[in-house]
Amino acid sequence: IEQIRADRRALLNGANLPLPGLSVEGGKLLYQGKAWDCMSGSEQLRVATAIVRCLNPECGFVLLDKLEQMDMQTLADFGAWLEANGLQAIATRVSTGDECSIIIEDGWAQNAPAPAPKPSAGYVPGWNKTKEG
């Protein structure tokens, strides 16, 4: 049994993981050094989406819930990553902001939403952002 466990760990350690910063250590999945329960909701969405994309690369969409866990800039970066990977998101996002509000009167939208933020400067579609201080 110990040999089987060791073989499985070796297989995981040598796996080509779908996201920069994603690793397996001690049998735990880590993203940028953090275990799943220590990741933000936004990080969990990124990791889960990257894994699903890797498991089923032929599928052109992903179902997501709780996008309100991402601020507008992170959401813009995530959208750019989805596009770069040929994915569409069917998602839910709860918000009271204007970015999620459309008022329809007599069949016409009354207020055009504010433009979404552009992806961050230095953004790389593999979620490999650089932080400059």
Image: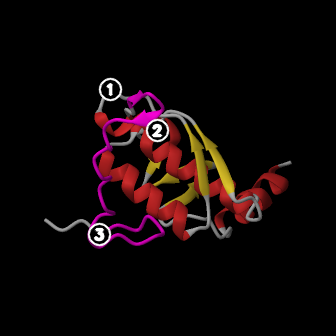
Give the residue at mark 2.
67
Q: Does residue 6 appear to the left or right of 109 in the view shown? A: right
Give the amino acid at mark 1: Thr
Residue 114 within the magenta-colored segment of the rendering:
yes
User: Which type of secondary structure does the marked residue at label 3 adopt?
Assistant: loop
**Which portion, as a residue range, is magenta?**
103-129
Q: Residues within 10 Å of mark 2 (few under 14, many from 20)?
A: some
Give the residue at mark 1.
96
Depth check, front residue: 97 or 11: 97
Q: Does residue 131 appear to the left or right of 5 in the view shown? A: left
How is the model colour-coded? secondary structure
Q: Give the image location of residue 121, x and y in percent.
A: 26, 70
Q: Give the image location of residue 22, x and y in percent.
A: 53, 59
CA gap between label 3 and label 2 equals: 23 Å
Residue drawn 45% across the image and 63% down it = 80
User: Which type of secondary structure does the marked residue at label 1 adopt?
Assistant: loop
Which of the two marks, 1 or 2, is nearer to us in this view?
A: 1
Which circle's residue, 1 or 2, is located before the other in the chain? 2
